């Protein structure tokens, strides 16, 4: 009846509305999110989930930094893997409670990136919390890149494009076996392929929306739903002329994108992900708020992106 739906959950699905990420906040937010997700499953869709990890990986980095004199800090790709494990576990528990069965699985997922990606030449993605200059300089001594922002110094890392979701075939096997699958959390653990063919982790973070699009293509999703905290992508966002985008084709959305309507680091990657998925598969991509995901799949809510005439 339903299709195979890839849902990408944003930060608001995993932290309190003010962005705080205590264990209780995370559990409560995930519990609420899974009620919406389970409704799609009950409506007959095959559901595949992915999620962001910004606050969680930021907290882990901070622990590593504060405890560096006691326990050796671990690389960033290890931190991403850890957040996949903890967030995946919370999602599994909440989903099992909602669905009443245990056919739920979270997959530790690696995402291949290209070591020649220009992002590695110019790391711009801020992660973790702000520090003073002295501490920033000390961390620079450990090979990290730090930049001065208005509110202080912050570590920046490369955010290369996902080339391939390496563990997508494990996801497909489980989906085909009837599991609700969580994969590529936090964009996936970033790895590169060395010259001898071996895979190795690399210090980077991968945008979760771009990874969601790659995962959606790889698992043969019919729909990509990007669940965030606004009901629609808008033109002239943040101005009195702001207007929600309803149904749109890839060519028209690309024009709006080129005209600068979608902020980098927030709506920009969501629009890029929607365009890539619709263009490559002919499937539908939807950008909407979490509590609208059911209505968005069956109705006229959210920003619905189609490849073009064939819809
Ligand atoms: P998530 O945590 O769900 O990935 P983000 O905070 O990264 O979400 O992105 C969603 C935010 O993008 C919205 O809350 C809004 O403030 C911002 N935004 C930027 N440009 C636009 C736009 N053109 N239309 C709608 N929202 C936009
Ligand atoms: Mg957010």
Image (tube, grey):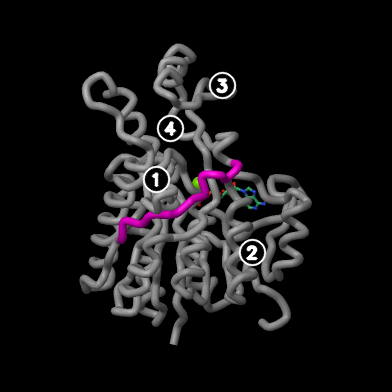
| Extent of the magenta region | 107-118
* Disc 3 to disc 2, C-alpha distance: 33 Å
Q: Earlier in the sequence, mark 2 or mark 1?
A: 1
Residues packed near mark 4 inside 10 Å, few (<14), some (14 to 19) or many (20 plus): some
Q: Is residue 208 something one can see in this rendering?
A: yes
In the rendering, at what x and y percent does residue 1 appear?
44, 87
Q: Earlier in the sequence, mark 1 or mark 3?
A: 1
Give me the residue at 35% from left, 62% from top.
Answer: 182
In the rendering, at what x and y percent does residue 228 appear?
51, 55
Circle 3 residue: 148
Q: Which mark is residue 16?
A: 1
Left or right placement of residue 302 versus residue 111 in this view: right
Q: In the image, which is nearer the foreground, mark 2 or mark 1?
A: 2
Q: In the image, which is nearer the foreground, mark 1 or mark 3?
A: 3
Judged by its main secondary structure, the magenta piece is loop
Q: In the image, which is nearer the foreground, mark 4 or mark 1?
A: 4
């Amino acid at each position: 009846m339903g299709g195979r739906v890839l849902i990408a959950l944003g930060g608001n699905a995993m932290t309190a509305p003010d962005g705080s990420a205590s264990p209780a906040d995370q559990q409560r937010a995930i519990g609420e999110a899974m009620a919406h997700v389970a409704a799609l499953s009950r409506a007959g869709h095959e559901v595949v989930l992915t999620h962001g990890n910004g606050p969680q990986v930021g907290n882990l980095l901070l622990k590593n930094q504060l405890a560096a004199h006691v326990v050796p800090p671990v690389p960033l790709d290890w931190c991403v893997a850890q957040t996949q494990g903890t967030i995946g576990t919370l999602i599994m528990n909440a989903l099992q409670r909602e669905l009443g069965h245990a056919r739920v699985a979270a997959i530790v997922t690696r995402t291949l990136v290209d070591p020649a990606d220009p992002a590695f030449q110019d790391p711009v993605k801020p992660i973790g919390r702000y520090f003073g200059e002295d501490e920033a300089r000390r961390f620079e001594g450990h090979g990290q890149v730090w930049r001065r922002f208005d509110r202080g110094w912050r570590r920046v890392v490369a955010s290369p494009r996902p080339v391939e979701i390496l563990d997508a075939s494990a996801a497909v096997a489980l989906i085909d076996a009837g599991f609700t699958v969580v994969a590529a959390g936090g964009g996936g653990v970033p790895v590169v392929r060395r010259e001898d063919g071996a895979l190795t982790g690399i210090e980077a973070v991968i945008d979760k929306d771009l990874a969601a699009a790659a995962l959606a293509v790889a698992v043969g999703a019919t729909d990509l739903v990007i669940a965030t905290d606004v009901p629609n992508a808008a033109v002239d966002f943040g101005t009195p002329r702001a207007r929600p985008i309803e149904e749109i084709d890839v060519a028209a959305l690309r024009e709006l994108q080129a005209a600068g309507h979608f902020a980098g680091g927030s709506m920009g990657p969501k629009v890029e992900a929607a365009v890539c998925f619709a263009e490559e598969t002919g499937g539908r991509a939807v950008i909407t708020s979490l509590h609208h995901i059911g209505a968005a799949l069956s109705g006229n809510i959210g920003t619905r992106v189609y490849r073009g005439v064939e819809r």
